[in-house]
Amino acid sequence: MLWSLLLTIQVAQSAPASHLVTNLPGAPSYSFQMYSGYLPIPNSNGRELYYIFTTSQNKPSTDPIVLWFNGGPGCSSLQGTFIENGPFMFGDTNHTMYTNPYSWNRIANMLYFEIPAGVGYSMMGSIINNSTNDAQTASDNLLGLQYWYTLFPEFSTNPFYISGESYAGVYIPFLASYILNSNAKTPASAIPIKGILVGNPITDYTVDAEAAWPSFLYWHQLIDDSIYFPWVNLNCSMVWPSNPACDPLSESMYDLFTGVNYYDIYKECTPEQPMAFYKKRLMAKNLQGISPCTPNIALTLYLNNPKVRNALHINTTLGAWSTCADLDYTIDMRGSIWLYPSLISTPDFLINVYSGDTDSYVATAGTIAWINNLGMTTNVTWSEWYVDQQVAGMYTRYGTNFRFNTIRGAGHMCIETKPAQGFSMLQYFLQAKDLPSTP
């Protein structure tokens, strides 16, 4: 209904010229099109989602649209745009932008939303919008996406997928469910969603993220028997209240983790003062004193350059861009695991979960645990998959539509760490094919 109303209010036209990015400072030459701008959320006291859209370098008129979210909750998806799978990249210490040979827009039209409203260059509007939650975020994402289609109606029939990492493990199943429900109510304006691709995803707090952290430390030789065995025997938990005797054990874990990259234990840590944001998240006590090790200095400097802000059509009333926003965000403690049975049962709906196996934040073992708890039948047994004649990770498939793979030697931001493997994974996912099991 809303989408139809918007279409009648706004004259349908191809990609709005006012949103076209015509001269992005520092960017290498490119032949595709880039757009950026704002998607107003109706009746929201001023919320507007900021987006960037890069057309495919292949066949934009027919190639799929892939929407990307970073996590948080409250971290900017422009990290994905400029340090993971976008056409132009910055490194951890390299402040010169370079062409990404594994950009996902080689084969897909890539869309990035900064969510929730108030994150990055999205507009919060009224201060009352600082308080938000998973359901509100999903509703805003749906309304923002519906508005985006009124700006780009020529893409209304392209296959649509949602992708992302970390807390996007909640964002994505929520939005997918909202889209499917909306499609059922208004089939004439249905969004042609075909599947989801989620990496190192927060999904089930009882088994993943903090719950899996101690076992990850032990099996990666970061703590020894003197800590781990008592931890298990006392039935200790990082998430829920447990025996007071567990407290010194957890403190020992933090002490032994000093200087290790939380998001990729084999990657060098680029130190910075822990952001206030990290101290206010769900596991606030546990994250205090652990540096995120990923300051994104080059990206922060770039996105706050006045010429860049002007080129990207940033609202002039906004302050500086930062990696994450300090929102009053209420997390649904059910995670997103409860949404999966319905998504799995949706005909021809493809689900691909992936996991970088050196990430201690959302460890692979925790992800495997919640997948196993779904009780699906294994149709492709656990096996290696390959990129360039090298083992890229492990792969398995459940039923016909649920795939899981690891990316070997990758951390939390898999696509940044292993771009070739990430690109290959995307190719096979969009083609609904199993990953290659031979070199």
Image (cartoon, grey):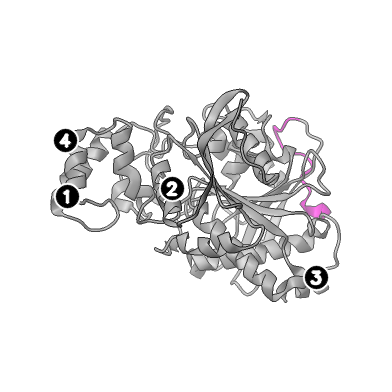
Q: Are marks 4 and 3 in contact (CB under 8 Å)?
A: no
Q: Is residue 199 left or right of residue 155?
A: left
Task: Considering the whole magenta stretch, tell me its main secondary structure.
Answer: loop
**Dot 4: what SS?**
helix
What separation in Å lies between label 4 and label 2 (alpha carbons)? 26 Å
Q: How many numbered circles are shown? A: 4
User: Residue drawn 14% across and 53% down?
Assistant: 244
**Image: 157 above or below 55:** below
Q: Quadrant of residue 9?
A: bottom right
x and y percentages locating residue 60 in the rendered image: 81, 46
Q: Are marks 4 and 2 in contact (CB under 8 Å)?
A: no
Q: Is residue 277 left or right of residue 41?
A: left
> Can residue 305 be seen by looking at this rendering?
no
Q: Which residue is mark 4?
A: 226
Q: Identify which amino acid the numbered label 2 is placed on.
A: Thr
x and y percentages locating residue 121 in the rendered image: 60, 52
Residue 234 is labelled as 1
Residue 7 is labelled as 3
Q: Which residues are magenta?
A: 16-28
Q: Identify which amino acid the numbered label 3 is placed on.
A: Leu
What separation in Å lies between label 2 and label 1 (alpha carbons)? 23 Å
Of mark 2 and mark 1, the one earlier in the sequence is 1
Front in this rendered view, residue 389 or 282: 389
Callout 1 crowding tier (Cα within 10 Å): few <14, some 14–19, many ≥20: some
Q: In the displayed orientation, state which residue is furthest to the left.
A: 245
Question: Is residue 23 in the magenta section?
Answer: yes
What separation in Å lies between label 4 and label 1 (alpha carbons)? 13 Å
